[in-house]
Image (tube, rainbow, N blue to C red):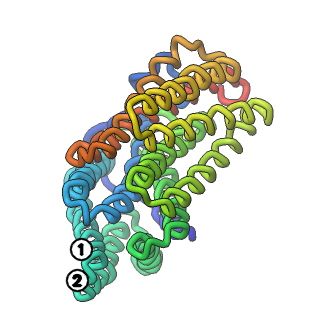
């Protein structure tokens, strides 16, 4: 299903408005311990920020839909949904101004409210509530957002509306999968929705940045930026899928754990294809082995029943995801271990913090820590992108 990608293709026909402020850079734009590259610019930051916020929204919706029975966890992810909306609104404001951003915020928040109501109706078997939410999504959100996009892009709403209708059907299907505990279909639908959401950012952001070069200088769609964006997307997806898998491990939901594991394999396959293209099959195979060892160690850490077994799993995770991965980066990209090591250590610490929250049922901190773990992967992605571009200057320079 390519609904959001098709929507993006329609939306990029034309964009209007005037930016009021610059987009916030991704965390790695200032945190990378290596020199900046052709992939780092205000235009690139805007594109990647939009990609990641739209992708994050998909995962928050998926995560909150699994948690209504655990009220504190549910509240935690609802709070993160609000944060995501605020961040998206700020980004819209930086691109098209205050008045348009206010319109966007109202429409986007209404969508979130309807999705939450739809979820609650499914969980409580309140068909009236879920039907009312579904009616609001199709009868209020879709036409309002269609008109909004039409006004901003100058594309007739008649072209946009059918695509939004299909988009909402896909989102509702993901929520239906969750409540039906159809985990294979759920994780397939999550990955499809996530891919489509990030394609919207990829399509729209370069168009907006190109229209306003004073606010977004640089190239938002060069091969170097494409590399940086793709690595950020793959690692964000990996982070949120990982914490969904560890939640299933700790919650003793084996069917969901298996489906999440399959989704992680699919994510790794996509990374493998990208690295094979960059460095060749032998180097990619070495990465696959290190990556698989890290994933296995994360699962072992989540399932550890004693302090001793937890420490053993943590040692295995550190060896795979810090020592071995750092070594692979040195071989593949010439990135020094003292540059990558601290960044990878921070990422391991962030992901284990989420798992500790899940194990301890620290629901009030869980969603924020989940987001922090994802943010740590952005630093890793930009680090790898910068080092890769430096090594392959003939291709990306």
Among the 4 quarters of the image, the one containing residue 45: top left
Among the 4 quarters of the image, the one containing residue 379: top left
Percent from the top left, x then y, of residue 204?
46, 54
Q: Is mark 1 on a helix, strand or loop?
A: helix
Percent from the top left, x then y, of residue 166?
46, 77
Percent from the top left, x then y, of residue 138?
33, 81
Decide: marks 1, 2 in contact (CB < 8 A)? yes
Quarter occupied by the C terminus = top right
Q: Name which of mark 1 and mark 2 comes first in the sequence.
A: 1
Q: Which residue is drawn at 57% across and 43% down?
A: 230
Could you tell me if residue 347 is visible in this image?
A: no
Q: Which mark is residue 129?
A: 2
- Front in this rendered view, residue 268 or 335: 268
Question: Mark 1: few, some, or many residues within 10 Å (few <14, many ≥20)?
Answer: some
- Front in this rendered view, residue 333 or 214: 333
Residue 238 horizontal side relative to residue 23, left or right: right
């Amino acid at each position: 299903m390519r609904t959001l990608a098709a929507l993006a293709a329609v939306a990029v026909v034309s964009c209007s408005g005037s930016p009021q402020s610059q987009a916030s850079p991704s965390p790695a734009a200032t945190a990378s311990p290596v020199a900046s590259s052709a992939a780092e610019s205000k235009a690139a930051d805007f594109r990647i920020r939009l990609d990641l916020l739209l992708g994050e929204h998909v995962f928050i919706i998926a995560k909150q839909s699994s948690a209504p029975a655990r009220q504190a966890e549910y509240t935690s992810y609802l709070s993160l949904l609000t944060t995501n909306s605020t961040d998206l609104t700020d980004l819209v404001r930086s691109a098209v101004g205050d008045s348009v951003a206010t319109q966007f915020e109202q429409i986007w928040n209404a969508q979130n409210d309807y999705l939450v109501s739809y979820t609650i109706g499914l969980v409580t078997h309140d068909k009236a509530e879920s039907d009312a939410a579904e009616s609001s999504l199709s009868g209020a959100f879709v036409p309002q957002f269609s008109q909004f996009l039409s006004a901003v892009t100058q594309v007739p709403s008649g072209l946009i509306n059918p695509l939004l209708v299909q988009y909402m059907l896909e989102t509702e299907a993901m929520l239906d999968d969750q409540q039906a505990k159809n985990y294979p279909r759920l994780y397939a639908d999550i990955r499809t929705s996530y891919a489509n959401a990030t394609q919207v950012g990829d399509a729209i952001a370069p168009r907006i940045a190109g229209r306003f070069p004073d606010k977004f200088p640089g190239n938002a769609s060069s091969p170097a930026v494409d590399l940086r964006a793709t690595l950020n997307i793959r690692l964000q997806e990996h982070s949120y899928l990982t914490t969904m898998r560890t939640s299933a491990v700790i919650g003793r939901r084996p069917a969901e754990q298996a489906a999440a594991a399959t989704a992680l394999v699919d994510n790794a396959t996509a990374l493998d294809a990208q690295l094979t293209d960059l460095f060749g099959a032998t180097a990619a195979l070495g990465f696959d082995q290190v990556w698989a060892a890290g994933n296995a160690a994360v699962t072992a850490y989540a399932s550890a029943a004693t302090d001793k077994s937890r420490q053993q799993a943590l040692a295995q995770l550190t060896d795979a995801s810090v020592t071995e991965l750092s070594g692979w980066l040195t071989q593949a990209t010439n990135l020094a271990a003292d540059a990558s090591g601290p960044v990878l250590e921070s990422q391991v610490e962030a992901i284990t913090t989420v798992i500790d929250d899940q194990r301890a049922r620290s629901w009030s901190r869980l969603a924020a820590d989940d987001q922090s773990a994802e943010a740590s992967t952005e630093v890793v992605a930009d680090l790898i992108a910068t080092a890769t571009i430096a090594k392959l200057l003939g291709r990306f320079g």
